Amino acid sequence: MIKQKTSVVILDANGDSDRKIQVPTFIVKNWKRVLGLGVLLICLACGTIVYLATKNTSERYEKELTQKVKALEAAKQSLATEEASNQMSMEQVQKSFDAIDSTLNQINAKMRKRGLKDIAPKIKNVGGPVEEEINLEELTKFYKKELKNLDKKLEGIPLGIPHHGKITSRFGYRRNPFTNKGREMHSGIDIKGRTGEPIKATAAGKVVHAGYKGQYGRVVIIEHSNGWETRYAHLSRTNVRVGQRVEAGQTIGGLGNTGRSTGPHLHYELLSHGTKLNPEKTLRF
């Protein structure tokens, strides 16, 4: 049926025959169906093109949206990491300040052990805005170093009370206690007490003498840093030996009445580079 052909004459505007073509007779007889099928094919083609274009656009938008979501997730993760890092830094700073407070408390405990006041007491009747420091980490390191140096210095400086008793004779000239006549130089202070009561070192150092020594009676002599020396005389006993390292506040002997003494007491001397000083000035500061 398709092989059968029909001649179609094409006329120009004047009605004259211009050209003749042959088309299958089937198309001529079923031109409506063929036209409808053509229109349908054109619509299908247009729909396919629109679908493909829409699909590509949708895929592109979906891809872009996915990338943006991933970027947001990465930014969120970065913020979380930064926040955790900041939190960790603040915790480290807090630990550093806690270490400073701990060191201060240790120094204050040592001061109280010597019979002295705290070196960092609570401050009253003060105020003002808190200024933000530029570098807390460096500030913390500075204070930790300074506090350690302070602690080390305080350990070797004779400060405080070797025995909690009443001072019966001060540094300087006094009347002879045995004859009650004339004057004699008293190179230390005498602190009254009961025999056997503990006598404590006023600074860390090395014991250079522990035993009987003339008018001192039983005495302990300790050398400290920077030329300082302390002497604890008229003891009833000694708890340390020559060459031993002692700490501030450590018991080194017992109060007694040995040597040139009129009764149980401690004779306490303080020397700086061999010069005897008034130890009473170091009992309180």
Image (cartoon, rainbow, N blue to C red):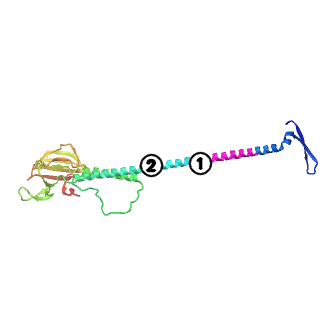
Element type at mark 2 = helix
Residue underneath mark 2: 84
Q: Amino acid at mark 1?
A: Leu
Could you tell me which quadrant the C terminus lies in? Answer: bottom left
Numbered disc 1: secondary structure:
helix
Quick one: label 1, few (<14), some, or many (20+) residues within 10 Å? few
Q: Amino acid at mark 2?
A: Ala
- The local crowd at label 2, few if under 14, some if 14 to 19, many if 20 or more residues have their Cα within 10 Å, is few
| Alpha-carbon span between mark 1 and mark 2 | 28 Å
- Residue 65 badge: 1
Image side of residue 39 versus residue 275, left or right: right
Residue 45 position in % (x across, y down): 74, 44
Q: Residue at x 88, y 38 (%)?
A: 5
Name the residue at 13% across, 59% down.
Answer: 173
For the stretch drawn in magenta, the main secondary structure is helix
What residue is at 72 percent from the left and 46 percent from the top?
A: 47
